[in-house]
């Protein structure tokens, strides 16, 4: 049965070209999100391809045998997918255990959920965000897609059998699946809330399965073995034109469909999945030219290794970028990371994917027994021992990995953030107390002056290197400070100098989500004459987003603080943008925090972004001096 099924199947070489397009999009979305903000759409493309090819094979098997070998289907999928997945998990975990133990936290849950193909739900349950470019460091974040596919592989063959037995007619099955795709897409739209993190609808099987289902549905009306090679020239022209248009639209979506927009969740990803289905259909048709156009040595090479490329991308990026300052020489590091990803995927393809796809239990067992009797200095013995050591180290890492653990520094930082959040909330007009807050007595010595908060003039002068005149002027200066966690951490420092300042800051805040928040401050009369903007630490910003902020701010004076994020490639781009905006708008004053702080690593916590007590004083002093000039 197996031989007949494979013999009657067509290998559609052009599909490798589509896979290449998808995996290039995903990788550059992670490496250069500002250059390819829609590259994440490579995932639904891969989902559609997977749905089509799997269902097409199931249909052939059903047609030839009037049944499906479900167990054999599961075994084929495991042999195809599991060895590389396990290898990535083992090698990455061993590396983390030896060299990057700060990533051990919750590692056990990430590994086990990935092995069980439920990683997407595990990440949702733990409140992890796919879109937090700064704080979500994990080499296994991307494995949510493997979980969605794995769940589909488990359930779909059983549903396929039920549909074939109970519904029978292919057109009716197509309509049923199409309705299911619409329900899934509607679920994504209903579950999405503009301005909030969309991870739940982005990860959820229920809200992402529509892409795979679209591929499933296509296989019922467009079976690859039933398509005729000889077709009229007019039909060929229509197919080729349709294929080229769909390919063009996918490329355009990669460039323009930013994940920060609402449109992707209100039908945009669904639309991309439909366009992909059109491209797959034309490519699969032997009478069209698309298959030939998408077939070349480069696409074939990358397409065959696309699974490994996808698996290794995140481990390479996360583990490499943790050791290297990628903010400078961005393209050099992009090239190095791409090379590492391709090397890893090539080794995986040659030594893991291809050999284990032909895995035979009996032969493997015999080889394992023979291994014990091979010479101690033989290549087989050395490779086997090295593999066992790596597995042992990875196992130790999984066993000792803590769950939801924070070290003393992290606990201190979290406590400071919560304390500053409460202080910031009280600065807003609607939440201010009727009574003045008591000032801390200025009994500080030189040793604890940084930790003491007081509005006493002498204290503020000494702590922030300000003149008496500056301190007095600050008490009558209206300021609204708006920003991310870097600003939030300095809330109480800012209040020492500007007691009446309104402060609105939050962890993970980005420029693109700030317009509505600023408008709310404005509507509540909390947007004062002097506005401090401290954004850009958590992701790329662009000129259009800044222009929208300036429209809300109006004619107020703006003090724009640039960023120091040496571990992220958007640092220099955002700082260049902020300098450009300061030149563009006369009412914008640039506060160069990067230049002042970049050579003072002792001003920062271990993440090299959030200031320590010393750093916060320097940050606030710079801010105050610019405002009070």
Image: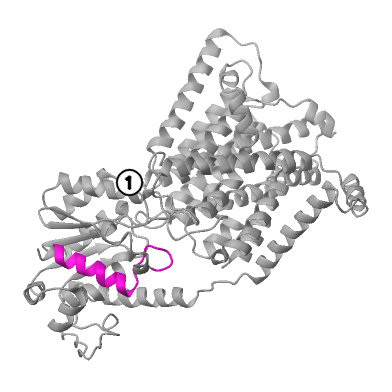
529 vs 62, left or right, is left
Q: Residue 171: in sight, yes or no? A: no
Residue 107 is situated, as x and y percent measured from the top left of the image, at: 60, 64
Give the left or right position of residue 399, taking residue 294 as reference.
right
Q: Quadrant of residue 61?
A: top right
Residue on which the image places disc 1? 573
Q: Position of residue 374 (x, y in %)?
A: 91, 50
Q: Is residue 422 magenta?
A: no
Q: Quadrant of the N terminus?
A: top right
Whole-percent x and y of residue 399? 68, 69
Majority secondary structure of magenta residues: helix
* Quadrant of the drawing holding the C terminus: bottom left
Residue in view at x 77 percent, y 40 percent: 357
Q: Which residues are magenta?
A: 605-626
Residue 248 visible in the current orientation: yes
Q: Nearer the viewer, residue 198 or 472?
A: 472
**Which residue, as the protein is rendered here, is positioned at the far top?**
233
Q: Is residue 242 left or right of residue 568?
A: right
- Indicate whether residue 612 is drawn in magenta: yes
Q: Residue at x 6, y 74 (%)?
A: 469
Element type where label 1 sits in the image: helix
Q: Residues within 10 Å of mark 1 (few under 14, many from 20)?
A: some
Q: For residue 17, which quarter of the picture?
A: top right
Q: Nearer the viewer, residue 249 or 558?
A: 558
Q: Nearer the viewer, residue 457 or 356?
A: 457
**Please, is residue 25 above or below residue 579 in the view?**
above
């Amino acid at each position: 049965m197996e031989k007949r099924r494979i013999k009657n199947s067509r290998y559609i070489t052009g599909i490798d070209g589509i896979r290449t397009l998808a995996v290039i999009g995903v990788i550059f979305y992670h490496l250069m999100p500002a250059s390819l903000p829609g590259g994440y759409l490579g995932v639904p493309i891969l989902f559609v391809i997977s749905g089509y090819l799997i269902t097409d094979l199931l249909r052939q098997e059903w047609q030839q045998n009037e049944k499906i070998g479900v167990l054999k289907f599961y075994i084929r999928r495991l042999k195809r997918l599991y060895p590389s997945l396990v290898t990535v998990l083992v090698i990455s975990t061993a590396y983390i255990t030896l060299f990057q133990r700060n990533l051990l936290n919750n590692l056990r849950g990430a590994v086990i959920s990935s092995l069980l193909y439920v990683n997407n739900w595990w990440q949702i349950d733990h409140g992890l965000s796919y879109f937090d470019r700064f704080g979500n460091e994990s080499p296994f974040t991307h494995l949510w897609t493997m979980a969605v596919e794995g769940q589909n592989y488990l359930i779909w063959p059983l549903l396929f059998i039920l549909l074939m037995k109970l519904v029978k007619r292919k057109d009716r099955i197509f309509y049923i699946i199409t309705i299911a795709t619409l329900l899934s897409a509607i679920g994504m739209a209903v579950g999405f809330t503009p301005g909030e993190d969309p991870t739940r609808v982005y990860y959820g099987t229920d809200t992402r399965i529509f892409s795979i289902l679209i591929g499933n549905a296509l296989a019922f009306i467009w079976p690859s073995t039933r398509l005729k090679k000889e077709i009229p020239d007019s039909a060929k022209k229509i197919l080729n034109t349709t294929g080229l248009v769909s390919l063009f639209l996918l490329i355009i979506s990669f460039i323009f469909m930013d994940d920060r927009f609402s449109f992707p969740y209100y039908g945009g990803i669904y639309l991309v999945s439909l366009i992909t289905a059109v491209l797959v259909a034309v490519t699969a048709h032997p009478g069209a030219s698309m298959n030939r156009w998408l077939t070349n040595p480069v696409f074939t090479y990358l397409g065959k290794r696309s699974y490994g490329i996808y698996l290794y991308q995140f481990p390479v990026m996360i583990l490499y970028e943790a050791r290297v300052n990628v903010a400078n020489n961005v393209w050099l590091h992009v090239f190095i990371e791409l090379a590492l990803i391709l090397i890893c995927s090539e080794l995986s393809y040659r030594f893991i994917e291809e050999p284990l796809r032909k895995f035979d239990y009996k032969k493997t067992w015999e080889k394992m027994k023979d291994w014990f009797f091979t010479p101690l200095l033989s290549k087989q013995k050395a490779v086997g021992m090295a593999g066992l050591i790596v597995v042992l180290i990875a196992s130790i890492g999984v066993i000792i990995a803590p769950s939801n653990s924070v070290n003393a520094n992290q606990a201190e930082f979290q406590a400071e953030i919560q304390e500053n959040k409460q202080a910031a909330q009280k600065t807003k007009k609607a939440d201010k107390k009727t009574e003045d807050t008591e000032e801390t007595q200025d009994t500080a010595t030189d040793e604890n002056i940084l930790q003491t908060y007081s509005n006493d003039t002498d204290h503020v002068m000494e702590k922030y290197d300000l003149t008496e005149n500056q301190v007095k002027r600050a008490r009558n200066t209206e300021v609204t400070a708006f920003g991310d966690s870097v600003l939030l951490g300095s809330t109480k420092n800012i209040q020492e100098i500007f007691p009446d300042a309104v402060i609105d800051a939050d962890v993970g805040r980005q420029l693109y989500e700030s317009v509505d928040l600023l408008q709310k401050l404005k509507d509540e009369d909390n947007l004062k004459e002097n506005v401090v903007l401290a954004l850009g630490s958590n992701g790329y910003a662009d000129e259009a987003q800044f222009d929208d902020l300036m429209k809300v701010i109006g004619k107020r004076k703006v003090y724009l603080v640039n960023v120091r994020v040496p571990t992220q490639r958007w640092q220099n781009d955002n700082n260049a943008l902020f300098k450009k905006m300061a030149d563009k708008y006369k009412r914008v004053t640039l506060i160069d925090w990067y230049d002042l702080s970049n050579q003072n690593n002792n001003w920062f916590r271990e993440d090299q972004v959030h200031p320590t007590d010393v750093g916060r004083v320097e940050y606030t002093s710079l801010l105050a001096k610019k405002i009070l000039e």
